[in-house]
Amino acid sequence: MKNGVVIVGAGHAGVQAAASLREEGYDGPVILIGDESELPYHKPPLSKTFIKDPIAKPQPLRGEAFYSGSAIDYRPGVRIEAIDAGARRLDVSGGGSLAFDHLVLATGARPRLLKLQGSELSGVVSLRSLADARLIRELSDQSEDVVILGGGFIGLEIAATLRAAGRNVTVVEAVDRLLGRAVAPVIASHVRQRLEAIGVRILTGTTVAGLEGEGGRVSAAITSGGERLPAQMVIIGIGVVPNVELAEAAGIAIANGIRVDQQMRSSVPDILAIGDAASYRHWFTGADVRLESVQNATDQARLAARTILGHADAYSAVPWFWSDIGDMKLQMVGLTSGGDSHVVLGDLAENKFSIYHYAGSRLLGIESVNRPGDHMLGRKMLGAGFSPTPQAVAGGPDALKAALAAFQEEPARAAG
C-alpha cells in the first residue's frame, strides 16, 4: 500500500501541488497539512480589500468540495514537529506519526521580527495570515494614527489602504528610498510622490528606537532622531524569513531557504520544496534566488507534481510579480538586477508607464505602472527569449508585437 505524498503547508504552493498531482494522474494518497484552521485562502487581498472592508470574507483558493472530490485529505490545524528523512516519517504535534513516499515542503515564510523596546505591547502587529489581517482590521477601527515600519510592498499596500479609510499613516523606512530591493528608483520615487499626495507621511533613512505604551497598548513610536510619532497601531513589515527549521533539523541542505535543484528536489531526493521557502539557481540569471510570489509558488508546485510522477522537466517559468498600492497597479516581469540601462515607455504624469531594463542588449525585465498590456507582452517576450531593441520599445506596443511576431516566425522559416 502506498503511503503517498504528504504536503506540509496549505498556502498557494501546497494547494497547487495537491491539485497538480491529481491533474497529472497521480492515484496514490495525497495528504495536505495546514497549521491554520481555515480553508486555504488567497493571501494578496489581505493587505488591501480585506482589512478595509469590515464584512469582507477570505477568498478560498479552492472550494471545500474540491478536496473531497479530488480525494485530497486536507488536515487543518495540524503542526509537524519533525521529519525523519531516513524512515520517511513525520512526527505530528500532539502525538502520532505520518509515513510518506514523497514529502513536499511548502512551509512558506514568516514576518521578520524586530528587536525593539515595546514590541510586546498590544497593537504591535505584522501581516502574514488571515488571523493577522483580522487583527489589523479590528485595531484599525480603534486607531486614528498608524505607524508602519518598512517601505516594501506589504507596508505600502497597507499604508494606502488605511489612509483611504481615513487613518493618519506614517511609513518609516530605514534605507534612503522605498521598495529598495524590489523596483527601480524612478518607480520608487513615483510611488512615494503619489502616496504623499494622498496624505501618507513617509520617513526614509529613518529607524525607530523604541515604542511607548499606555495601559499595555502602544501609543507612540520614537524615531532614532527623537521624534515622537503617535500610534495606536504599529505594523511591522520589514520582510520575511523562510520557514526552514523542519528541513534543517532533518539534515536537509539550507541556503537562504531549502536548497532545491531544477526539479524542486531537496538534498534528500524524495523530499521536495516549493514556494517562499525554496531557494534555487535561477535559469534566467544564473544566480541563487528565493522568490516570494504567488506565480513562483504555483509554477514550482506544478513542476514538483510532475517530478513526483517521474518527469524530468527543469524549472523555467518566467518570474512575475504584482502589487496594488492606492491607484497604482505595479506589475513586474523578469529579474532586473544587473541591469545597466533602461527605456521608459508611457507618461509618469499620467500614472501610466513602463520601464524596460537591459543588460547590454539583453532585456532583463519590465516594471509597469497601470500598463497591464506592457506586462502581458513582456511575459510573452521573455518566455520566447526575445530581447527587442530599445528602438522597438520606443515604437510602442504595436511595434513590439510586430517585432515579437517576426522573431517567432524565423525558426518556422528556417525549419521550412
Image (tube, rainbow, N blue to C red):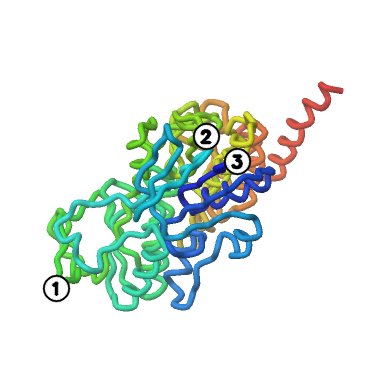
Query: Could you say whether the residue bearing mark 2 is in a helix, strand or loop?
Result: loop
Question: Answer yes or no: do the residues labelled 1 and 3 have beta carbons within 8 Å?
Answer: no
- 121 sits left or right of 62 in the view: left
Among numbered discs 3 and 2, the one appearing first in the sequence: 2
- 141 sits left or right of 222 in the view: right
Can you say which quadrant of the picture contains the N terminus? top right
Residue 295, image x, y percentages: 55, 47
- 392 sits left or right of 136 in the view: right
Among numbered discs 1 and 2, the one appearing first in the sequence: 1
Viewer-nearest residue: 209 or 99: 99
Can you say which quadrant of the picture contains the C terminus? top right
| Residue at left offset 29%, top offset 62% | 125
| Residue 134, quarter of the rendered image | bottom left
Query: Could you say whether the residue bearing mark 1 is in a helix, strand or loop?
Result: strand
Disc 1 from disc 3: Cα separation: 52 Å
| Residue at left offset 15%, top offset 58% | 210
| Residue 87, quarter of the rendered image | top left
Say above or below: 370 vs 1: below
Say the numbered circle drawn on residue 227.
Answer: none
Viewer-nearest residue: 61 or 8: 8
Among numbered discs 1 and 3, the one appearing first in the sequence: 1
Disc 1 designates what residue? 214
Amino acid type, residue under disc 2 in the picture: Met
Say the numbered circle drawn on residue 305.
Answer: 3
Disc 3 from disc 2: Cα separation: 9 Å
The crowd level at tag 1 (other Cα within 10 Å; few <14, some 14-19, many 20+) is few
Disc 2 designates what residue? 264
Residue 73, image x, y percentages: 55, 55
- Please state which of the two labelled residues, at mark 1 or mark 3, is closer to the viewer: 3
| Total tally of numbered discs in the picture | 3
The crowd level at tag 2 (other Cα within 10 Å; few <14, some 14-19, many 20+) is many
